[in-house]
Amino acid sequence: MNACPPTEAPLALYVHWPFCVSKCPYCDFNSHVREVVDQAAWRKALLADLAHEAALLPGRTLGSIFFGGGTPSLMPPMTVAAVIDAATALWPAADDLEVTLEANPSSVEAARFADLAAAGVNRVSLGLQALDDAALGFLGRAHDVAEGLDALATAQRHFGRVSFDLIYARPGQSVAAWEAELARALAFGTEHLSLYQLTIEPGTRFATLAARGDLTIPDEDVAADLWDATQALTAAAGLPLYEVSNHARRGAESRHNLAYWRMTDYAGIGPGAHGRRLGMATQRHRKPENWLTAVTRNGHGLCEEAILSPSQRATEMLVMGLRLAEGIDRARIPADRIDMAKVDLLAGQGLLSLTADRMRVTPAGMPVLEAILREVVRP
């Protein structure tokens, strides 16, 4: 997995669908609950927003499309098909174009999987989140384990590539309980897993509960033990960590997400979507109604375009690239953006690895990645 300069790498397209049936108590994503969605208006607006970005990025090869949210499995398959068809008409598609859609594992949404596959989706990421009914209730999920596993089986029948998410380090979760849950997850044979330790994000329902003392997540020592168990089990199953929270068989890494972490160009359309276009940071209006109004008025949903300075680009490259097990090409690291004295100190502690051509966070350093970044990346 060698990093490519941004101008040589395939373009990635992110499509944000902001709507959910309900808001999960841990979620701080740009997601919204609406009684009614005008599907025709939304399809038209997404296509207009897409055309605007394509006009500014001519001649690129499209390497991936990612439908995120929100809950994009609530999108009508004809809308998904329209976006894919338009994107591959506006840009030549790579032979191995990756088209991912995030999905909730409900029976209603699983019933759409065949149509979504026919629309051109070839990779699905399922939000299973837990393999324990009590934990799913705690996380505010609408499905139970049986329904989730039925959806997983349906996904494996219809899509060539399948991933699913699990949240661990939940209140009261023991290492033994997590090992049993993860071992069960690995037995399903998917090529990719996203495994996230529960964090308390500002503005969420969980943040309110934590502030009242009604929710406590495992302390640092338990979290470290859970992390170690995670790495041991996934590596033994042939799905080693390739990014701080993501595990895959060799060659099954999410090509779309690698575009973010390697800091190559990606176009973002839909409410709140971010992008990186030829050295410029782009952002769309966050609120769905504001985005829709902007597209109707201007032909696009942009609210901000900002040229990134060389120092800003270097900082982003460090913050994103050190998330990856592959690390960063040292030739791309400007000396003024990194504290080499701190790097040498952390390397001596076994938390960073330095070779002639690469800098990496070691497996021992990954659990404290955020602390490492604060130390070595200059503000």
Image: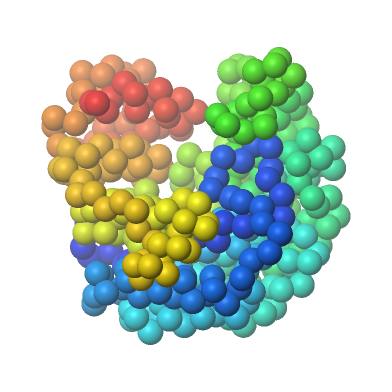
Describe residue 25's horizontal placement relative to residue 254 as left or right: right
Q: How many labels does the image show?
A: 0
Residue 284 lies in what quarter of the image? Answer: bottom left
The C terminus, quarter of image? top left
Q: Nearer the viewer, residue 269 or 144?
A: 269
Residue 230 lies in what quarter of the image? Answer: top right
Residue 45 horizontal/vertical position (percent): 46, 71
| 1 lies above or below 77 | above
Q: Residue at x 46, y 70 (%)?
A: 46
| 13 lies above or below 242 | below
Describe residue 265's horizontal placement relative to residue 173 as left or right: left
Residue 150 horizontal/vertical position (percent): 81, 62
Q: Which colour scheme is used?
A: rainbow
| 231 lies above or below 55 | above
Q: Nearer the viewer, residue 293 or 70?
A: 293
| 286 lies above or below 268 | above
Q: Residue at x 64, y 36 (%)?
A: 26
Residue 267 lies in what quarter of the image? Answer: bottom left
Residue 131 horizontal/vertical position (percent): 78, 45
